[in-house]
Amino acid sequence: MTEATVIQWLSHNGVQVHPSIQISRSPSGEYIINSTDNIPSSTTLLSIPASAIITASSSSLLQRIPSLAEKSQWTALILTVMYEASLPDSKWRAYFDSLPTEFDTLMYWTEDELKELEGSAVLNKIGKEEAEAMYSEEIKTFTDAHADVFGGIDVSLEAFHRAGSWIMAFSSDFEKPGNTRHEDAMDDDDDDEYDSLDTDKVLVPFGNLVQMDCDLANCEFSPSDTSVSLVATRNIPGNTTLYIDPGPVPRSDLLRRVGGYPQSSAQNDVIEIDSTLVISVAGKNLSEGTRDSRIERLVEEELLEDSYDIEADGAIPSEILIVIQAFLVDDATFQSYVNEEKFPKAKKDARTRDVMIETIRKRGEAFTTSREEDIGILETSAGALGRRKRMAVEVRLGEKEILRKMEETVRLWDDAESYGTGRSGKRQKR
């Protein structure tokens, strides 16, 4: 790919390009988009017509196989990308030729490389087995049923993983026009990273040339019914690289989805605390039957999640503290909560402190290295580490830093402190 190839494709497909931006190579050799002159905030830098965006509805595949519309967004887009990427004369040929064919996403890591992330909950989110089951049960079944259309198209497992990796790394989720549903009214099924009733999943050609950084972000993609625009979110001086904000996504999830991350995303790191760990510590003096009945009641009251995300500041969600109190009290007190339909306040007292400290200690034991060891590895061996191992060390160290901040916070609690019953710390699905 060359700068001229990209400019030619954009021009041929009706993309309007602001005269004060250009495509160039960074010192590391990757293609980026720069400003050439000062650009005021709110300026439209690129305007890409809807016909140039890659969706199931913009591909000829839908016209050839109308039943594609009955598939989920994720399935339909994968089939579309597999189909278009194999066509020599695809409208998006230049774009597909510019995309990587080798990936650092966790799907492609070896078992030994993944062991470097032991202790991080991200290992439970890779989904390789689920993806390959989807390929066998959905993708292959569909392409076999329409062999007349997919003749000559690469529908191999490798092509499926490649298309899925492109979508995971480079797709955008744009809110559907006219969506007025309130977030609190959404069903759990809507909050899925692959499919949502409220957003359209699309690939914006060459949108991946805009770099990602939480702190340096100076533009954003803005969709409409007829186009997707890249708009300046602040004044951009001349000779400045364009950046978008990847959103409040921890480095572990960016590593899983994209295969890398900006260091600024460390501010969005989380560590997951499994509710079973909290219950095993707080309810260790209760019988198994008593623990199970209390679990059932807390689930009914929507006070118990599968796990809780502790964010980078180490603040403890009030839900965890309510759960701890529910397993520390005696049977008569817990029954009074049930009878009165009122649950305990999220106390920060000595008993809760001791439970949290033990929980933090046990959570830290899931890692095979200590925080100090990881710091030493990065300080003394950073230059000798491969890219994947360095990222693994950074991710697991980030989670251990959150545990350290949690413990610092918890050790300050005493018997006199307590605070309200809010539920703001409920786990956010990512």
Image: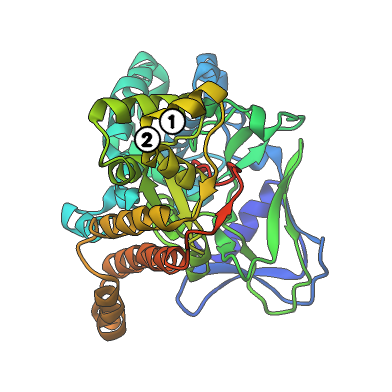
Which numbered circle lies on residue 118?
Answer: none
Residue at left offset 52%, top offset 65%: 267
335 vs 404, nearest the viewer: 335
Whole-percent x and y of residue 397?
A: 34, 68
Give me the disc on residue 330.
Answer: 2
Q: Residue at x 44, y 36 (%)?
A: 305
| Residue 83 quadrant | top left
**324 or 22, nearer to the observer:** 324
The residue shown at (51%, 19%) is 68
| Local SS, label 1 | helix
Residue at left offset 63%, top offset 34%: 199
| Residue 177 percent coordinates (x, y) | 75, 32
Q: From the viewer's perspective, tell me whether residue 414 is left or right of residue 398.
A: right
Residue 260: image location, x then y, percent: 41, 61
- Residue 72: where, in percent of width, then height? 50, 24
Q: Is residue 169 above or below residue 71?
A: below
Rendered view: 256 above or below 376: above
| Residue 394 visible here | yes
Residue 61, relative to residue 259: is it above or below?
A: above
Question: Mark 2 belongs to which amino acid?
Answer: Asp
Task: Return the residue found at the far front.
Answer: 332
Task: Check if mark 2's residue and mark 1's residue have beta carbons within 8 Å.
Answer: yes
Q: Secondary structure at mark 2?
A: loop
Q: Name the residue nearer the viewer: 249 or 296.
A: 296
Q: Which residue is mark 1?
A: 334
Q: Residue furthest left?
A: 112
What is the crowding at mark 2: few (fewer than 14 residues within 10 Å), some, or many (at least 20)? Answer: few
Residue type at numbered disc 1? Phe
Q: Is residue 162 left or right of residue 389?
A: right
Q: Going by the image, does 118 lie left or right of 11?
A: left
